[in-house]
């Protein structure tokens, strides 16, 4: 199992917890709540208080169907929040598909670049990340949010996602990114239907064979709402999905996830400790 953590990030003998701060008016589960920079910074500090090891700051919603924001607007949203959190000693990651935003974010103190497109949306991204030398999350992605649902077609989702991630990894390595910078992510909900997400979670062993730490982002996603649908078939709203998120966190951490990306940090921070103790009890480290 992968036990190493890229240099520059907290080194813990358990799955890490990444808390989410979406500085957006329209993100799926928390759109608008942290749109004001001061409120976003306070929220980031609260997440650290609750046990977040990393705070992920994003300025562009990636919910299905979302339109893109401009570069200037994205920078305006994330830069001050990243700078303020980094000044407080927080390990900050920037959730962006744009090389220019990643570069500005690292200059403002971000310690990790979280690119949901895995370098596909902006060809300049791998070179920027290579030059910055910071850890880099390469997520599985098949296209922008506006039309990603049409791309959710797989014969064998686990094999195909692992192969597509391997290609992305090879491509960013060829652009100068080092192996030690890399983290991979199956991209739950990104060009994936509910059954694809469940197969990927259950297939983490195959993804681990890629040899890189794995981050899992299941928090409050629609496949959980669908699972918990009421008798009328209506999906449960995202704010009723935190307990299911917690169950995924415990199972994913036990299965060897390196990090979970979550909105409601405190119980997830407990869950990763339970999973670590469980693994230790099994003699698996
Ligand atoms: N999901 C969202 C945004 N960023 N980053 C990574 N690495 N993995 C994810 O699964 C992921 C992400 C969308 O979720 P949100 O809008 O609820 O934050």
Image (cartoon, rainbow, N blue to C red):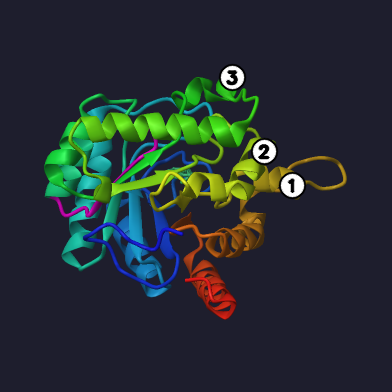
Percent from the top left, x then y, of residue 205? 55, 50
Q: Quadrant of residue 50?
A: bottom left
Pointer 1 and pointer 2: residues touching (CB < 8 Å)?
yes
Looking at the image, tell me whether mark 2 or mark 3 is earlier in sequence order: 3
In the foreground, 285 or 252: 285
**Separation of disc 2 and disc 3 at Cα?**
14 Å
Is there any visible trace of residue 160 in the rendered image?
yes
Look at mark 3 in the image and give the residue it sits on: 150
The image quadrant in which ligand 1 is located: top left
**Separation of disc 1 and disc 2 at Cα?**
8 Å
Look at mark 2 in the image and give the residue it sits on: 194
Highlighted magenta segment, given as a residue range: 108-118
Check disc 2: other Cα within 10 Å, few if <14, some if 14-19, many if 20+.
some
Look at mark 1 in the image and give the residue it sits on: 227
Is there any visible trace of residue 63 in the rendered image?
no
How many numbered marks, from 0 up? 3
Q: For this view, does 249 lie left or right of residue 13? A: right
Q: Which residue corresponds to the image point at 32% horizontal and 67% vertical from the top-left?
A: 45
């Amino acid at each position: 199992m992968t036990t190493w953590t890229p240099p520059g990030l907290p080194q813990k003998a358990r799955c890490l917890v990444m808390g989410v701060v979406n500085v957006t008016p329209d993100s799926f589960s928390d759109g608008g709540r942290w749109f004001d920079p001061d409120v976003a910074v306070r929220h980031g500090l609260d997440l650290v208080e609750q046990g977040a090891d990393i705070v992920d700051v994003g300025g562009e919603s990636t919910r299905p169907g979302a339109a893109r924001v401009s570069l200037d607007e994205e920078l305006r949203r994330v830069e001050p929040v990243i700078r303020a959190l980094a000044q407080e000693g927080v390990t900050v990651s920037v959730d962006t598909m744009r090389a220019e935003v990643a570069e500005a974010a690292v200059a403002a103190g971000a310690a990790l670049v979280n690119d949901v497109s895995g370098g596909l949306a902006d060809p300049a991204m791998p070179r920027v990340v290579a030059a910055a030398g910071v850890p880099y999350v390469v997520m599985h992605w098949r296209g922008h949010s506006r039309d990603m649902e049409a791309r959710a077609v797989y014969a064998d989702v686990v094999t195909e996602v692992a192969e597509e991630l391997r290609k992305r990894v090879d491509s960013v390595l060829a652009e100068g990114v080092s192996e030690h910078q890399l983290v991979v992510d199956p991209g739950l909900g990104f060009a994936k239907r509910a059954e694809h997400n469940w197969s990927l979670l259950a297939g983490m062993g195959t993804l681990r064979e890629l040899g890189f730490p794995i981050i899992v982002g299941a928090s409050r996603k629609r496949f959980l709402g669908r699972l918990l649908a009421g008798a009328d078939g209506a999906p449960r709203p995202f704010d009723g999905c935190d307990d299911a998120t917690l169950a995924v966190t415990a199972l994913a951490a036990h299965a060897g996830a390196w990090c979970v990306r979550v909105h409601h940090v405190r119980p997830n921070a407990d869950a990763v400790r339970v999973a670590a103790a469980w693994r230790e009890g099994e003699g698996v480290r």
